[in-house]
Image (cartoon, rainbow, N blue to C red):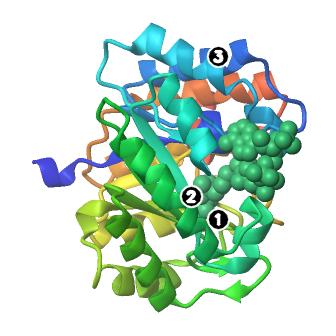
């Protein structure tokens, strides 16, 4: 039944590639997106409309979004793009983006490093960003990320009550969903539970997603804890690619193959073909000249 369906938000083309030193070609990126769509994924975050001075790897955002609209425009797949401010939102909307994601942090230290403003200042910016979405002339879904929900590389551990308050603020602004980001992957099932316990007092599970990074090898355990608690949207990155250039010490996202393997093996449906996904993970790892960061992916591939 529908309660056993978990929607995967594949973030490799954005979170996975934003931190690459040797920037992959636009063709490699569009090829990755096409392969991901072919696995059955319904949501693929494809790029970000941020300052190219801050994140050079996403400078080809226009070509990427155009490719998605042209090649997959007639399908039901969603292609969210990240926008930090009105300038990014305007550009994304001009190119016909139907879903955008804004990103806030739970800690001022990370907010300043990542977006050059405090948490409160970022919420002031969002008012204008959300207004642009409402007046776009076509329906635009806005997703809200909330980073450093367990700990911040600059400010230390995060108070769960603070996370709950900010998650609610994102919903009040007009976000349809809040993705709770353990940006540096310091969470454990225990701290994830304490955080979600507080957040769910203010925002229903149906409006939440979990976004885990795997720095301490807790990614799958943290995702499954959130799913046990009723979260039905999980962000993940094929081959475990990823990391934020402004989050010191953060490694890749939890690998999509690992998450899909855990979910399917626990009775959940994702609509994703795991073999095709594992093949995609191997392919992109080779393209980038990196070891495949997914344990399940490697196991399936070498079987
Ligand atoms: P700033 O320097 O304070 O901004 O940066 P500014 O308004 O002074 O602009 C600086 C320059 O950037 C100007 O150009 C602007 O026009 C330009 P110049 O006049 O010098 O030639 N600019 C832009 N260009 C294109 N698109 C735009 C844009 N905005 C300004 N949208 C700013 C502030 C927010 C722009 C900057 O800090 C920034 O771009 N930050 C983005 C950092 C980022 O992308 N981080 C990674 C994503 S977040 C993440 O990974 C976490 C997540 O995965 C969840 C989790 O794991 O927790 C989502
Ligand atoms: Mg992330």
Relative to residue 157, is residue 209 depicted above or below? above
- Crowding around mark 1 (Cα neighbors within 10 Å: few <14, some 14 to 19, many 20+) is many
* C-alpha separation, residue under disc 1 versus residue under disc 2: 12 Å
- Looking at this rendering, what residue extends furthest in the left direction? 1
Which residue is disc 1 drawn over? 183
Q: Position of residue 168 (x, y in %)?
A: 36, 75
Number of marks in the image?
A: 3
Between 5 and 196, the residue placed more toward the observer is 196
Earlier residue among tags 3 and 1: 3
Which residue is disc 3 drawn over? 63
Q: Is residue 175 visible?
A: yes
Label 3, ligand 1: CB separation under 8 Å: no
Relative to residue 105, is residue 207 depicted above or below? above
Identify the residue shown where x is 53% and y is 68%.
123
Q: Position of residue 249 (x, y in %)?
A: 82, 66
Between 277 and 203, the residue placed more toward the observer is 203
Label 1, ligand 1: CB separation under 8 Å: yes
* C-alpha separation, residue under disc 3 versus residue under disc 1: 27 Å
266 sits left or right of 1 in the view: right
Label 2, ligand 1: CB separation under 8 Å: yes
Which residue is disc 2 drawn over? 103
Secondary element at tag 1: loop
Q: Is residue 244 visible?
A: no
Q: Nearer the viewer, mark 1 or mark 2?
A: 2
Secondary element at tag 2: strand
- Crowding around mark 2 (Cα neighbors within 10 Å: few <14, some 14 to 19, many 20+) is many
- Crowding around mark 3 (Cα neighbors within 10 Å: few <14, some 14 to 19, many 20+) is some
Relative to residue 262, is residue 274 depicted above or below? above
Q: Position of residue 17 (x, y in %)?
A: 72, 37
* C-alpha separation, residue under disc 3 versus residue under disc 2: 22 Å
Identify the residue shown where x is 72% and y is 68%.
117
């Amino acid at each position: 039944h529908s309660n056993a369906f978990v929607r995967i938000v594949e973030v490799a083309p954005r979170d996975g590639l934003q931190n690459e030193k040797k920037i992959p070609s636009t063709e490699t990126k569009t090829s990755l997106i096409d392969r991901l769509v072919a696995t059955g994924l319904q949501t693929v975050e494809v790029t970000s409309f941020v300052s190219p001075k801050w994140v050079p790897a996403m400078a080809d955002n226009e070509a990427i979004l155009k490719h998605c609209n042209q090649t997959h425009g007639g399908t039901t797949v969603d292609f969210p793009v990240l926008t930090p401010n009105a300038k990014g939102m305007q550009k994304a909307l001009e190119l016909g983006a139907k879903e955008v994601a804004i990103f806030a942090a739970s800690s001022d230290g990370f907010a300043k490093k990542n977006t050059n403003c405090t948490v409160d200042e970022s919420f002031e910016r969002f008012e204008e960003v959300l207004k642009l979405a409402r007046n776009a002339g076509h329906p635009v879904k806005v997703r809200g990320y909330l980073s450093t929900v367990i700990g911040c590389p600059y400010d230390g551990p995060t108070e769960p009550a603070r996370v709950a308050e900010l998650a609610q603020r994102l919903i009040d602004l007009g976000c349809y969903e809040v993705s709770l980001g353990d940006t540096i992957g310091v969470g454990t099932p225990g701290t994830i539970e304490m955080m979600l316990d507080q957040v769910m007092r203010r925002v229903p599970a149906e409006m939440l997603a979990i976004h885990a990074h795997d720095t301490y090898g807790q990614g799958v355990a943290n995702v499954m804890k959130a799913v046990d608690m009723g979260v039905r949207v999980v962000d993940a990155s094929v081959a475990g690619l990823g990391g934020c250039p402004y989050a010191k010490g953060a490694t890749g996202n939890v690998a999509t193959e690992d998450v899909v393997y855990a979910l399917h093996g626990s009775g959940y449906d994702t609509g994703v073909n795991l073999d095709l996904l594992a093949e995609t993970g191997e392919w992109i790892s080779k393209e980038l000249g990196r070891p495949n960061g997914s344990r399940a992916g490697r196991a399936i591939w070498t079987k």
